[in-house]
Amino acid sequence: MLVVAEREQLPVQQARDGKPEAWDILFRRYQLPLYVYVFELVHHEQTSLDLVQETFIAAVRNIGGLRDDAKFGSWLFGIAHQKCIQRWRKQDRDEVSLDEIPESPDESESGPDALLVRQEQEAEFMQLLNQLPLPQRSVLLLHFVEDFSIEEIAGITGANAGTVKSRMHYAKRALKKLLEEKK
Amino acid sequence: MKTSREILFKQHQTTEPKLDTIRHEIVNAEFVREGRRVAVPKFRVVGTATLPLLIWRELIFPCRRIWTGLAAVWILILAANVSLREHSPAMSKSGPTPGIIMSLKYQQEILAELLTDRSAPREVDRQKSFSPKPHTESVEIQAV
């Protein structure tokens, strides 16, 4: 299992000072997770690359707006999430409904990152992930890719923590169900 | 067994070279070095010589359209004010009209009348005042 790098050790302050080397380290750290997240939402390689590029540019230009250096990762994903939404609106795609899932705060659950997949199921896993509704997929991807907390995901997606928790629960349950059906 | 993160990253590892290219382009761009200056402006000590320039650069130039609009509105107001003053019939003539003079004279007369001593009865009032007469005399008058 890959270990997510310590966010506190990233040279955010140096990046604020306009040091290209610092930006290089930050972008190298986040380029693949960001790309994975964006691609799994938009499913188009060139669009995803464009969105990652736009996210990086926006990060450089708006680094002054980042209050807490330790939250650089979630801040960057928040920019990428907004860029995806802007792109959808621009392309006049189907409206993304974010309210279709009821709340379910009662059930305790282990994190989706604990979900282990056998090698022969990898392709199926990707296929099943894409079958999930967009809001659930977004929440699940953020948790898979960067192990963000509920609060961080809420900040990135602009939803409240209860909604995020609910989506996480339903996404995990749906994914497990689909995987069991395929066995 | 693999985690979902490992599977996702494995699926997209082939895109890494393209992402590297994007990263290099952005990191080597000029605006990266200027990022700090754009994001958080530093406070500087300003001398009197550079003050007008600073006011122009910081206050007027960024909002030049708004300032231009405000100036245009003020010019319009002033122009309208001047043109109204020129075309007003009351303001265009040098002296007061005969009607105004008559009105003023009448007002002065009324004022003088009001201010005269009212304690001494006037001639008209004296004639109208009641003078007692014998009862028989008043009856004769009625008979006639």
Image (tube, rainbow, N blue to C red):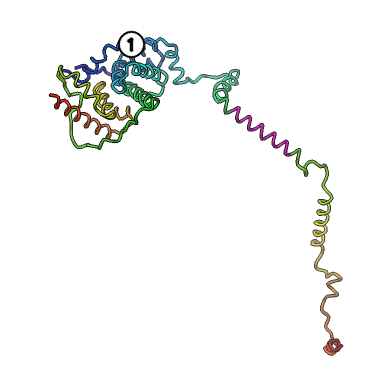
Q: Is residue A73 left or right of residue B114?
A: left
Q: Quadrant of residue A144?
A: top left
Q: What chain letter is assigned to the residue under label 1?
A: B
What x and y, as percent, mark residue A86?
Answer: 38, 25
What x and y, as percent, mark residue B57?
Answer: 56, 20
Q: Residue at x 27, y 11 (%)?
A: B14
What quarter of the picture does the C terminus of chain A occupy? top left
Q: Is residue A115 magenta?
A: no
Q: In this view of the protein, which residue sits in the foreground, A172 or A165?
A: A172
What x and y, as percent, mark residue B55?
Answer: 57, 23
Q: Is residue A97 left or right of residue A106?
A: right
Compared to residue B81, the image places residue A39 above or below, namely: above
Q: Main secondary structure of the magenta part?
A: helix
Start and end of the magenta stretch? B67-84
**Which amino acid does the dot numbered 1 rest on?**
Lys
Q: Residue at x 23, y 24 (%)?
A: A129
Residue identifier under label 1? B18
